[in-house]
Image: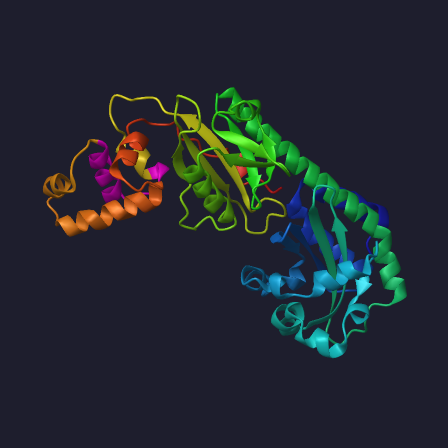
Amino acid sequence: MPDFESLVDDIYEAAADPDCWPRIMHDIGKVAEAAGGVLIARRADAWLGWRCSGALEKGAEAFFSSGGLQRSQVLGRLLAFNRAGFVSDQEGFTEEEYAEEPVIKEWCAPNGIHHCTATAVPMLNGDLVMFQVKRRKGDPPFGPAELDRLDALRPHLARAGLLAARWRLERLRSATEALATLGIPAAILDVDGRVLAANGLIEDLSSHHVWMPRDRIALIEPAADKLLRGAIADLGNPAAASVRSFPSKGTGERPVVMHLIPVTGNARDLFGGGLGVLTITHLTRPAALDAALVQSLFDLTPTEARVAGSLAEGLSLDQIAQRHKVKLSTIRSQVKSVFAKTGANRQSQIVALLAAQPKLWRPPLELEQSQL
């Protein structure tokens, strides 16, 4: 059995380095004479990330990515106990219910895992971490002695989770302040549209947005705000086709371009998924249109970027077809795609949007890959 004090030290180390958790969950499993353990992070209604010991890795990726946790009853029943301690499967389920539980049926049983005990640790900021410890099929259920040993570790697990959440928030704040030094208004948003961190530049830019209850932000221009809502809803899916860069007039004299950039990273990051960096760039008229910038900014194909550039020049669809030596129907299809990706619905909007180049910002590598 692992040394208690050494294990506690390791738990606090994992608060700063999530890569330590697989080893630590293995050691926690040994404390309860189990095969291993898993921890899972959750924010609002979204499961964000997980870490598990080696004995439980097989099939875990497929289970989590297929939405297995959304189908599971484990968390709901665990929270119903309102217990600051570990709860065994036999307390929360009948044998028949447990056999049909997705965690068991789809993930654990195929790996020879059966009995489980778990605890949920709510964070002050609304995040939640669930710890599960699992035994191999054929081993007895968890008894009072094993649960007592795990409960002795629970306060340290709870504090480590709180530290991880706080460090994550500090990193987000640091990221927005780094953008402020570049003159870029920025805020970090979660999948619910809640602002987790913001720099002073975006807080002072009242000509384009307003602050809403529960730390939310809304754009003054209705069309732009609708695009922002759609982009926020797709934060958990970086491959989604939502418009993420779009113009906003606001009430000021200077139009801006809004960018909502998904923060992606390792699929098993504990608190890193489902975030977006909202940046605002003022339009400044350049000497010439940069097609490569337009392409990357709005996720256009090279052909769509050339068509967008032609629209910005004021060319008609017939003229664009002649320039590129293609059928008019082809240009119409490409223009339709450009409109969808930029959030525009007429040529004058494309001209206003592309006649000036905003600076394009990409999340710093340490934020993009951070294991928060």
Display colour scheme: rainbow
Q: Is residue 86 above or below residue 124?
A: below
The residue at 66%/42% (across/down) is 17
The residue at 65%/63% (across/down) is 56
Residue 81: tell me if it is visible. yes
Residue 118: tell me if it is visible. no
Of 4 and 278, nearer the camera is 278
Q: Position of residue 359 (x, y in %)?
A: 39, 27
Left or right of residue 279: residue 118:
right
Write the start and end of the magenta stretch as one range.
296-312
Q: Which quadrant, please, contains the C terminus?
A: top right
The residue at 62%/68% (across/down) is 107
Q: Which quadrant, please, contains the N terminus?
A: bottom right
Q: Position of residue 171 (x, y in %)?
A: 62, 33
- Asked whether residue 301 is drawn in magenta, I would say yes
- Asked whether residue 341 is drawn in magenta, I would say no
Q: Position of residue 302 (x, y in %)?
A: 25, 42
Q: Is residue 54 above or below residue 347?
A: below
The residue at 61%/30% (across/down) is 173
Of 278 and 91, nearer the camera is 278
Q: Is residue 26 above or below residue 107?
A: above
Q: Main secondary structure of the magenta part?
A: helix
Q: Position of residue 249 (x, y in %)?
A: 40, 29
Left or right of residue 84: residue 41:
left
